[in-house]
Amino acid sequence: MKNYVLSVLVENKAGVLARVSGLFSARGFNIRSLAVAETDSPSVSRMSLVVNADEKTFEQVKKQLNKLIDVVAVQDFTKKDFFDRELLLIKLRYTSQSRSHIIKIIELLEGKILHVGTKVICIEVVGDKERVATSLQLLKPYGIKEVMRTGVVAIGKE
């Protein structure tokens, strides 16, 4: 099993997400990550999907997606150069002793402090899956209170 990254252009109208996700669920395909937003054209949205599958299953997914009437285009990043990013928002508990350590970690990760309260600090980290995983690993010992992740978005280099 391998993670595959797809970019799917779809018509921006009600029910399209349900039809795409229904395609996956009806066939037992697992979506590891899904991010959807309008493109520069208000009539078109882009779905960034990460699918965990074997090669044969992944090829089935692409064929099935291309058959959906609401799908404009399917782009497979498997053999292409691309950038991928994920937004990670973390709320951490902190103490007067841990605060400076947390700030150093955030600087190391090139993250951003969004809010400092009396007992919690909210942090933003943007990066590829390795940076997000490293961020969680380094900050976990300080007491993560809440985590929000956007899922992967990707764009080809060419």
Image (spheres, rainbow, N blue to C red):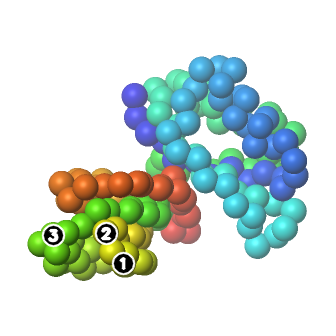
Measured Cα–Cα span from mark 2 to mark 1: 8 Å
Residue type at numbered disc 2: Lys
Measured Cα–Cα span from mark 3 to mark 2: 11 Å
Q: Is residue 95 above or below residue 150?
A: below
Residue type at numbered disc 1: Val
User: Which residue corresponds to mark 1?
Assistant: 116
Few, some or many C-alpha atoms within 10 Å of disc 3 (few <14, some 14-19, many ≥20)? few
Disc 1 element? strand
Q: Is 147 in front, or is 39?
A: 147
Spot occupied by residue 98 in the image (x, y as percentages of width and height): 15, 70
Q: Is 158 in front, or is 109?
A: 109
Q: In this rendering, does residue 91 appear at all?
A: yes
Disc 2 element? loop
Residue type at numbered disc 3: Ser
Q: Is residue 60 above or below residue 151?
A: above
The residue depicted at 72 percent of the width and 29 percent of the height is 23
User: Which residue corresponds to mark 3?
Assistant: 98
Q: Is residue 68 left or right of residue 22?
A: right
Disc 3 element? loop
The residue depicted at 18 percent of the width and 54 percent of the height is 141
Measured Cα–Cα span from mark 3 to mark 1: 13 Å
The residue depicted at 47 percent of the width and 33 percent of the height is 52
Q: In this rendering, does residue 80 appear at all?
A: no
Few, some or many C-alpha atoms within 10 Å of disc 1 (few <14, some 14-19, many ≥20)? some
Q: Quadrant of residue 62?
A: top right
For the residues carrying marks 2 and 1, which lies nearer the camera in this image? 2
Few, some or many C-alpha atoms within 10 Å of disc 2 (few <14, some 14-19, many ≥20)? few
User: Which residue corresponds to mark 2?
Assistant: 119
